[in-house]
Image: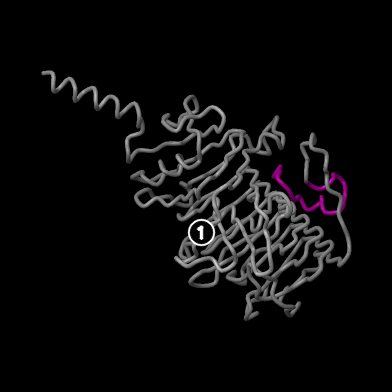
Amino acid sequence: MKTYKNLFIIILIVFVMNPVIEGQISDLFVNANSGNDHSVGSKEEPLKTLHEAAERVNHANGKGAVTIYLSEGIYGLDATVTFHPVNWHFSKDERLTIRATVLPDDAGWNPGMMPVIVSTMPLDFKPYGNQDPLGGASYGIQIETSYVTIQGLRVLGTPVHERPKEGMVRRNYPIVREGRNLDDLRITQCLFVGDKVAIPNHLAILASGQGIVVDHCVFYHCKDAIVFWHSDRPAEHCEVHHNLFIGNYGAAVWSWSAAEDLKFYNNVIDNTNVFWILNSDEKASFSLSNSLISGYNELVNKGGGSAGFGEKADPAKLKFGKNVIVKKEGTLQIDEDPTSRNYLQLMPGTPGTELGVGLFTK
């Protein structure tokens, strides 16, 4: 009898320490300030880290929608957070969603309520198992499953010296998808912020595969904004719309793997180094509509990579509709009042606002 009693106590202790039974999953709540990674992950008892939320998803068995709600707070990533569920299956209508608890369109929202993602891990990522040739890299959030939405986050880079010497580029990639056969990744209403001196945001979104959609995001002083990276065939069903690109000291769009059906519309680019970088073979052409490009050093390049921006390309590969305005010189008016709901977006009533770019969809 004593043996059974001791066994019951052991089982009880294990359950208390690990309250979620492996294989089951529901919506998860995460709070960097008050959460506990031994909690059940409910609204009343949230987790503390995005790492733990990813572990719960990765070890689940079944199918259906899962939403991870991030409360206001600072989420320091000391290691890559990888979402790679093997036995849980999502679909177009039953997605994995990683989102802020309060979104920009919600009543009472202000920019200070956005969960902040910042990478603090060592730059020791080894591409394909090889030593990084440029001095070190890291991934922030890595998505290795289809049918994912990321929404309402403020995403920083990493506090390193990006170019300590010639031939070195130390870099962090905040959001990555490497899977060439994956489909349907939407990144929406996110604010990507960088500073090349204090916290370089080397490349906000690096995504392979199909169905990459980026909308209603703001890229503020990032080096590069969006790279369509690798795919087993040209990446179809991709869209870039209603985004604001401000002061990119690299390039706004790298269409390396994008198919010609890429939809680029209702975007504003302000004061960028290079607007668009094509694949080195220059085979694909792209149609752009309803956009304003104001201020750039180079309009269209090809090739390039982490260490450079390639060389000049054929500008005819970009087909500008009549409703696209391209100005070599120019700086738009940005709201820099940190108390404003409209912070780091276009000043109301100024050029570009008629396109509906920025964090708000309503």
Q: Residue at x 72, y 78 (%)?
A: 311
Above/below status of 120 relative to 45: below
Numbered range of the magenta stretch: 345-362
Q: Quadrant of residue 289?
A: bottom right
Give me the residue at 71% from left, 42% from top.
362
Q: Residue 219's spot in the image, x, y percent?
A: 71, 53
Q: Which residue is mark 1?
A: 125
Return the x and y of residue 313 as percentages of the image width and height.
73, 79
Instruction: Give x and y (percent) for residue 165.
Output: 68, 65
Percent x, y of residue 112 = 70, 35
Q: Is residue 196 left or right of residue 255?
A: right
Q: Main secondary structure of the magenta part?
A: loop
Residue 353 on the magenta span: yes
Residue 74 is left or right of residue 183, and the answer is right
Q: Nearer the viewer, residue 153 or 286?
A: 153
Residue 272, picture quadrant: bottom right
Residue 281: say if magenta: no
For the residue marked with disc 1, what is the amino acid? Answer: Phe
